[in-house]
Amino acid sequence: MYKYLLCWRYLKTRYIALASVISVMLGVATMIVVNSVMAGFAHTMRDRLHGILADVVVESYDLDGFWDWRDVQSIIQKECGDLVEATAPTMETFGLLKMYLPDGQAVTRQVMVIGIRPEDRAKTGDFSEFIQDDAGKPIKPGFEVPKNWQTNSPAGHLLKDTPKDDPLHDILKQQAGEQVPDRGAIVGYALATIHRPGSSTDDFIAPPGSRIGLAFPKSGRKPEAAYDDYTVVGYFKSGMSEYDSMHVYVPLERLQYMRMLGDGLGAGAVNQIQIQVKPGVNINEIAGRLQRVLDSRRPMYFRVATWEQKQGPLLEAVKIEQFILNVLLFLIIAVAGFGILAIFSMIVVEKTRDIGVLKALGASTSGVRGIFLSYGLALSIVGCGAGMIEGLLIVHYLNDIENVINSLTGTRVFNPDIYYFSEIPTLVEPWTVAGIVLGAIAIAVTASVWPAQRASKLHPVQALRFE
């Protein structure tokens, strides 16, 4: 019993030990906050990447694709049966986008032109959740151009409602009098807008009803360019700049026809089939099974990959960053452990006479050792408990804290223009928090072992001899 009484007395009176408590607390809190933010980033990014791509993608190594895609769909249905919810044929190709700035200059951008059937693509992934109008409101995926846009000027319906001092007025006026193509296109949000530093809004350089031109390669032995005009009917905004600044979605049949890979009526080639599987299905198993079957049909022609495999380098980079950060931050707690080691060593020197008295009165070696180990355990529990509470509170109010810092410094700590998140994403993983706390306790207790062992080996006569 005396061990716990002495431990409690030291905990209340030895204020120098407060430094150990604070160092452990700060280390644990820092690790919880950083891990929660990193986990939130990774989780949000994975959700968005998964929404852009279906669970499994069957694609050909040939950019011109394959005409027998309906047979491939039948194979998918035969092999996977009830495990598959939907499939969507897709044609992807590189291209160039032509649009105009307010001063009338033409702008050319490299893009990825993607031919889809909106009703099919909406069933695979979260594609439909990323489609919106110029006001940021969700719209139904589709390429239909309103009749009044076709009969009037391409921007006539917008020109009358646009002030003359608005930058959009020059664009709309320049396009007035031109005939709007009846072929709609969904353009990446970053392609169609310009965000000026310091501005809270985006300026559209391709507002709804604008005509854009797309150039892309035709099929054939000799590469030639095809050109086609489209009308902007919506925007693709996933929050991932790599896609929002590159993707342009057009009708599948039209792209097949212009690339000389289809008749424009439904018969044509595709180079991808997006597959959405049912919840709980092992997508890696599905991908492996389809790869084996398609290889037996046409060796070295098809590649079957899950969405994680297609985004492997990016996801792996995030994992490496998390691992390195954890290692570096865990060194903070290791430093706290060395602080405990130094403080306990000093306490042993100071309490040499007391230890001698205890041993002279019959305290055992294990009893003296237990005093200091219990003291180290108590300090670590208090520090880790306070650090866990502090870290969880910071995570909970992180965005409020960020707003306060922004107002005090006048700068954005977390700029949504860079990270494409409206607020700092966080995700508290209970097992991670438990691992941090238990690891910190283990380090703190381990740091008290050597001083405790040194104190327990003191001989009572020698301990009292120098006092």
Image (spheres, grey):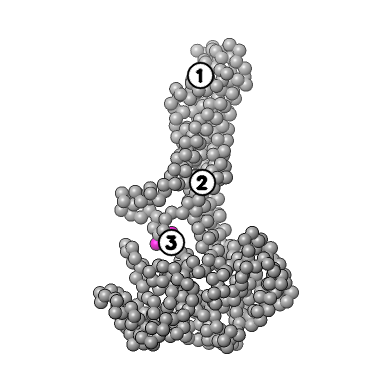
> Residue at coordinates 41% horizontally, 61% vertically from top-left?
418
Tag 1 residue: 351
Going by the numbered disc 1, the residue's amino acid type is Lys
| Residue 420, disc | 3
Q: Please give the name of the residue rendered at 60% of the width and 85% of the height, measured from the top-left corner.
A: 267
* Left or right, 372 with reference to 176: right
> Which of labels 1 and 3 is toward the front?
3
**Residue 328 or 105: which is nearer the viewer?**
105
Residue under the image location 55 percent in, 87 percent down: 264
Dominant SS of magenta comes to helix
For the question of whether residue 262 can be seen, the reply is: yes
Whole-angstrom CA distance, mark 1 to mark 3, is 58 Å
Between 151 and 154, the one lying in front of the other is 151
Label 3: element kind: loop
- Judged by depth in the image, the label closer to the viewer, 3 or 2, is 3
Q: Would you say residue 348 is visible in this rendering?
A: no
- Disc 3 marks a residue whose amino acid type is Tyr
Helix, strand or loop at mark 2: helix
Q: Which mark is residue 115?
A: none
418 vs 155, nearest the viewer:
155
Q: Is 278 placed left or right of 337 in the picture?
A: right
Q: Looking at the rendering, which quadrant does residue 453 occupy? A: top right
Please determine whether, in this image, residue 159 is positioned above or below residue 388. below
Magenta highlight range:
417-421
Q: Residue at x 31, y 79 (%)?
A: 159
Q: Given contact means CB atoms under 8 Å apart, are the residues at marks 1 and 3 in contact?
A: no
- Which numbered marker is on residue 328? 2
Asked if the residue at tag 2 contacts the one at tag 1, i.e. Cβ–Cβ closer than 8 Å, the answer is: no
* Residues at marks 3 and 2 touching, judged by CB atoms closer than 8 Å: no
